[in-house]
Amino acid sequence: MRIMNDNRNGSAVSEGDRLIAMATGVLMAWLGMNAPRAEKCLRRIAALMETRPADLALYLVDLAEKEAAAVGRDRADSGDAER
């Protein structure tokens, strides 16, 4: 993994960590995830891509199903669900 210099404070930041930080914001906005959960999911995806790419598809399907269920529960709890 390539190491980059973070211009804000001069510290070395790997390209992978920088991309994960950017993608964390995307997942937070797109799926309504909180930052720790989004980062955990992204790190799991990155690890699966390197070690077991075949398991990546299963993980993504499982993640999508869990997030869809969580959104449904949130809507039901807030009274926004269709009745």
Image (cartoon, grey):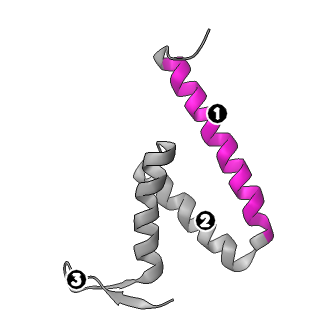
Number of residues whose C-alpha sits closer than 10 Å to that of mark 2, classed few (under 14), some (14–19) or many (20 or more): few
Q: Position of residue 10 (x, y in %)?
A: 21, 86
Whether label 2 touches label 1, CB < 8 Å: no
First in residue order: circle 2 vs circle 1 = 2
* Amino acid type indicated by mark 2: Arg
Q: Residues within 10 Å of mark 1 (few under 14, many from 20)?
A: few
Secondary structure of the residue carrying numbered label 3: loop
Main secondary structure along the magenta-highlighted residues? helix
Residue 2: image location, x then y, percent: 46, 91
Q: Is residue 21 left or right of residue 46?
A: left
Which numbered disc, 3 or 1, marks the residue closer to the eye? 3
Residue that label 3 marks: 7
- Tell me if residue 68 is in the magenta stretch: yes
Magenta region includes residue 17 = no
The tally of labels here is 3
**Residue type of the residue flagged with mark 3:** Asn
Measure the C-alpha gap from mark 3 to mark 1. 40 Å
Give the numbered dot on residue 44.
2
Q: Is residue 65 left or right of residue 82?
A: right
Cα separation between marks 2 and 1: 20 Å
- Residue 4 at what x, y percent from top left? 36, 88
Position above or below: 19 against 34: below
Secondary structure at numbered mark 1: helix
Q: Position of residue 83 (x, y in %)?
A: 62, 8
**Residues in magenta?**
54-77
Q: Are marks 2 and 3 in contact (CB under 8 Å)?
A: no
Query: Mark 3 or mark 2, which is nearer the start of the sequence?
Result: 3
Instruction: State which mark lies toward you, 2 or 3.
Output: 3
Location of mark 1 (residue)? 69
